[in-house]
Image: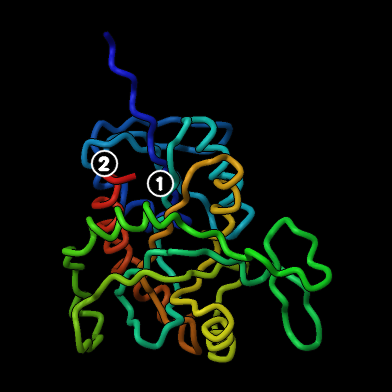
Amino acid sequence: MNAIPERPIALLSPLVEERDALFHRLTDVEAHVIGTLPVTTGKLEGHSVALAESGVGKVASAAIATLIAKSFDCRAIVVCGVAGGIDPALAIGDVVIADRLIQHDYGHLTNQGIRNFRPGVPPIGEARDRIAFDLSPELLMRIGGVVKDIKLPPLPPDLGVETERPPRIAFGPIVSGDQFINSEEVRERLRRDHAALAVEMEGAAVAQATELIGIPCIVIRSLSDLAGADSHLDFPKFLRAVAPAAAEVVTRIVSVL
C-alpha cells in the first residue's frame, strides 16, 4: 500500500529577513506560485512544510494564512519572526511562544480608551468574553517538552549589547495590532491590560483565521526591540541578528505539531 502523504505545516514570516532564517534550513525545496503568492515547499527536519512571506499586518497575514492553508491542506500554521518586548523581565534576543493571542486594537474606542472584544463580534455593549485565541494545553505541553533544553544563540558581539544572561524562551500572551509600537505609555498599557510578553502585527489575526479553518496557530517571536521609545532604532539594528533564534525554535517543534 502507498503511504498517505504527510499534510504540511505552513510557515509564515512577515518579512523577508524572517523568511530567509527558515528558508536556509529547508531541504527538498520546490518553488510554487499560488495566485500571486510565491510559496516554497520542502522538508524541515524531515517534516513537510510550506513557507511563505506573509507581509506585515493583520489583513495581509490572515489572508495569506487562509490561502496557504487551504491550497496545501496544511495541518498547522506557525508564524515565525520578531516582535517587540513588553515584559520588562525580557531582553532583546529572547524568544516568546504564545500561549494566547489577543488583537489589542479591536474593540470599542472611547475617550477612556479601548474596551477589547473578540474579533468578529460587534464591539458594542459590555460583552467581553473570550477575547483571546488560546493554544490548547495539550499542544503547549508537547511544545514545552521539546524546547526545554534549547540553547538560543547569543547576540553577536559587534552589536555592542551587554547582557547579564543568555537568551531564553518564555511562554505567555502575545498581542497583535496594526501599529508598530514606539511608545513607553502604550507598552505599559499592553502589559497592564493583557499581561502581554510581546507585541507584533500578525499572530492573533492568523489565529482568528485558523480557528475558522480548524487547525492550530503557533506564534514564535524573537525580540528585536522593547516596544518603547527606542524601538524604531532597535528594530532594524537587531532584526537579522535575532530572527535565527525564532527559526531555531520552529525547527525543534515541527516534530510535535
Give the image location of residue 209, x and y in percent. 59, 48
**Amino acid type for the residue under numbered disc 1:** Leu
Residues 129 and 104: in front is 129
Label 2: which secondary element: strand
Quick one: quadrant of the C terminus? top left
- Residue under the point 68% across and 60% down: 119
Using a 10 Å C-alpha cutoff, classify the residue at mark 2 as few (fewer than 14 neighbours), some (14 to 19) or many (20 or more).
many
Give the quadrant of residue 157: bottom left
Residues 93 and 108: in front is 108
Label 1: which secondary element: strand
Q: Which residue is mark 1?
A: 11
Quick one: quadrant of the N terminus? top left
Task: Say left or right for 142 vs 82.
Answer: left
Task: Say left or right for 163 vs 132.
Answer: left
**Amino acid type for the residue under numbered disc 2:** Leu
Q: Which residue is mark 2?
A: 44
Residues 99 and 158: in front is 99
Task: Say left or right for 239 vs 245.
Answer: right
Q: What's the mark number on residue 87?
A: none
- Residue under the point 54% across and 53% down: 207
Residues tagged 2 and 1 counted as in contact (Cβ below 8 A): yes
- Residue under the point 80% across and 61% down: 122
